[in-house]
Structure formats: structure tokens, C-alpha cells
């Protein structure tokens, strides 16, 4: 079940607060106004949007809001519960046969598990089942890669447009060396665009893309457990053997908890 991932906004807020505190500790509240530059914002944000629109198709751009929302969501995977599900399915298959599993699939929420069990019920060979399910995993990875590639490109373009803004500011400054009053604003454009672009890239786009990549890796890991569980059920493995096999995917901490639960039941 997905829930709100508070670490993403907390990380962004911490980054912004660190920057604000650095400015306030050096120049006080009055120094903040020098870091607000409309021209720099227009160059970085406008150039970034232009680069993204050129780089991607309209279909790819339409999924950007959904991709951004995924950065603020966390999928709670209960691996012990997942393993218990396959242990129960394995026991039922050995007692009543594979065909009996189809009747209880309404209680299974994960569509990937349902698909695997239906393939097993249809009598498809284990190698073929694994190939079919792995093909879906590969397709999922590709969809996720395309989704987060927008954020990855934004992380590349933002500092580049910051440098472009710096060049614009330097050109304006060099053209008005005889006008001391214009040197300050032009220098602000030159420096703040680089700051804006670098902050956007390293505080927002690159960390979000990295988080999405980690989420994909976690989802692939869970689907690998499901595939092994489906193959175990289809091949008629002993529930205890299947449990031991799938428990290899658990972390050391989860294994200790599982062992303690088993000891408690035995006592």
C-alpha cells in the first residue's frame, strides 16, 4: 500500500533552510533580498523548460506530474507477509491441486501474483512462466526509466542554463563598465543564475531521479521474490522448503524477527 513519503519534502526543506541560514548568518535578513533576481529566475527556469520540451515528446511530458508525485509516495512492502502468502498457496496446491488456487485469487491484491498463479494453473512450464513474468519486469523497468529520464535531463540542463545566465550577466557587465551603477545588478545576474541552476539540479531533480531509481530497484526485488514463489507453487515444492528458499531474500534483521516468531510458535 502506498503512503506519503515525508523524506522528500523534508530533504528539500532542510536544503532550503541550510541556504537561508548561511545567508542570514553572514548578512542578516537584509541580505536575502540580494538573492532574489527575476532575470536569473527567468533564464534558468525558462531555459530549462525549453530544453525539456525540445528533448521529449508530448506523450512523455504528460507523465511528468505522475512521475513527480511518485517521489512523494512510499510503497510499503511486507516481505514476510508476501512469503507467508506463497507458503499458504503452496500448501493449498499440494492438498487440493493447482486448480484450487484459482478460486481464492480474489483475496490476492497484487495483480502480478494473480498473473503468475493463473499461468501456473494453466499448466504452463516453469521456464515459460519465468520468461513471461520477467518480460513484464523488464517492461516496467523501461517505463520507469523513461519517466525519471525527464528529471535526470532537468538535472543536467539546470546547471547548464545557470552558466548561460552567467555568461549573459558577464556580457552585460562588460558592456557597461563605464556605468558603475549597472555593475552590481549585472554581476548579480551572472552569479545568481549559476546558483539557481545548481540548487535546482542538486536539491530537486537529481535527488528525485535517484529516489525513483531506488524505488524501481526495490520493486524489481519484490517481483523477483514473487516469481520465485510462483515457480515454487507451480512445481509443487514443500511449503517449508519454499519458505526457507524465499526467506533468503529477507534482510538479516527480518530473518531474526522471523526466527523469533517461529520460536514463539514452537514454545
Image (cartoon, helix red, strand yellow):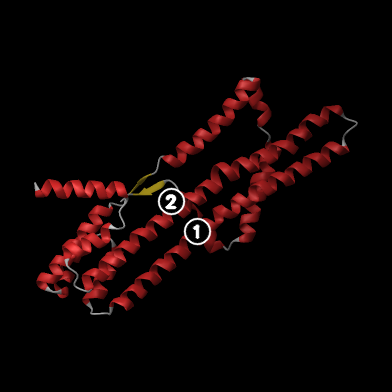
Asked if one can make out residue 66 in the rendered structure from this viewpoint, the answer is no
**Which of the 4 image quadrants contains residue 172?**
top right
Q: Which residue is mark 1?
A: 147
Residue at 37% x, 59% y is 221
Q: Is residue 23 above or below residue 41?
A: above
Say whether residue 232 is left or right of residue 160: left
> Which of the two discs, 1 and 2, labels the residue nearer the N terminus?
2
**Which of the 4 image quadrants contains residue 181?**
top right
Measuring from the top left, give residue 55's x and y in whole percent.
62, 60
Asked if one can make out residue 71 in the rendered structure from this viewpoint, the answer is yes
Residue at 40% x, 72% y is 135
**Which of the 4 image quadrants contains residue 169?**
top right
Measuring from the top left, give residue 47's x and y in whole percent.
67, 49
Measuring from the top left, give residue 162's x and y in whole percent.
69, 44
Mark 1 crowd level (few <14, some 14–19, many ≥20, 10 Å Cα): many
Q: Which residue is mark 2?
A: 70
**Nearest the camera: 180 or 1?**
1
Label 1 with label 2: CB-CB less than 8 Å: yes
Q: Is residue 15 above or below residue 256?
A: above
Say whether residue 108 is left or right of residue 149: left
Q: Is residue 155 above or below residue 245?
A: above
Q: CA distance from mark 1 to mark 2?
A: 10 Å
Mark 2 crowd level (few <14, some 14–19, many ≥20, 10 Å Cα): some
Measuring from the top left, give residue 238's x and y in whole percent.
17, 67
Q: Is residue 201 above or below residue 144?
A: above
Residue at 78% x, 43% y is 168
Query: How many marks overall?
Result: 2
Say whether residue 108 is left or right of residue 13: left
Mark 1: secondary structure: helix
Q: Residue furthest right?
A: 178
Mark 2: secondary structure: helix
Amino acid at each position: 500500500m502506498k503512503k506519503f513519503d515525508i523524506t522528500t519534502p523534508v530533504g528539500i526543506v532542510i536544503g532550503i533552510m541550510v541556504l537561508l541560514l548561511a545567508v542570514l548568518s553572514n548578512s542578516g535578513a537584509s541580505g536575502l533580498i540580494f538573492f532574489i533576481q527575476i532575470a536569473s529566475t527567468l533564464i534558468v527556469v525558462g531555459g530549462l523548460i525549453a530544453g525539456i520540451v525540445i528533448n521529449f515528446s508530448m506523450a512523455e511530458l504528460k507523465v511528468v506530474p505522475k512521475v513527480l508525485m511518485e517521489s512523494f509516495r512510499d510503497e510499503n512492502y511486507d516481505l514476510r507477509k508476501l512469503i507467508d502468502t506463497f507458503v499458504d498457496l503452496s500448501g493449498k496446491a499440494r492438498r487440493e491441486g493447482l486448480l484450487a488456487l484459482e478460486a481464492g485469487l480474489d483475496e490476492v491484491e497484487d495483480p502480478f501474483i494473480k498473473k503468475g498463479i493463473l499461468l501456473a494453473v494453466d499448466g504452463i512450464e516453469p521456464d515459460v512462466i519465468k520468461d513471461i513474468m520477467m518480460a513484464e519486469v523488464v517492461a516496467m523497468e523501461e517505463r520507469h526509466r523513461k519517466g525519471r529520464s525527464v528529471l535526470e535531463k532537468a538535472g543536467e540542463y539546470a546547471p547548464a542554463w545557470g552558466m548561460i545566465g552567467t555568461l549573459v550577466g558577464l556580457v552585460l557587465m562588460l558592456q557597461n563598465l563605464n556605468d558603475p551603477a549597472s555593475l552590481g545588478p549585472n554581476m548579480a545576474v551572472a552569479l545568481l543564475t549559476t546558483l539557481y541552476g545548481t540548487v535546482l539540479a542538486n536539491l530537486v531533480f537529481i535527488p528525485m531521479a535517484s529516489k525513483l531509481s531506488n524505488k524501481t530497484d526495490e520493486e524489481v526485488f519484490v517481483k523477483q521474490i514473487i516469481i520465485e514463489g510462483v515457480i515454487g507453487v507451480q512445481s509443487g515444492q514443500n511449503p517449508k522448503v519454499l519458505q526457507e528458499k524465499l526467506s533468503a531474500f529477507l534482510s538479516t534483521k527480518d530473518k531474526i524477527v522471523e526466527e523469533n516468531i517461529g520460536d514463539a510458535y514452537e514454545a
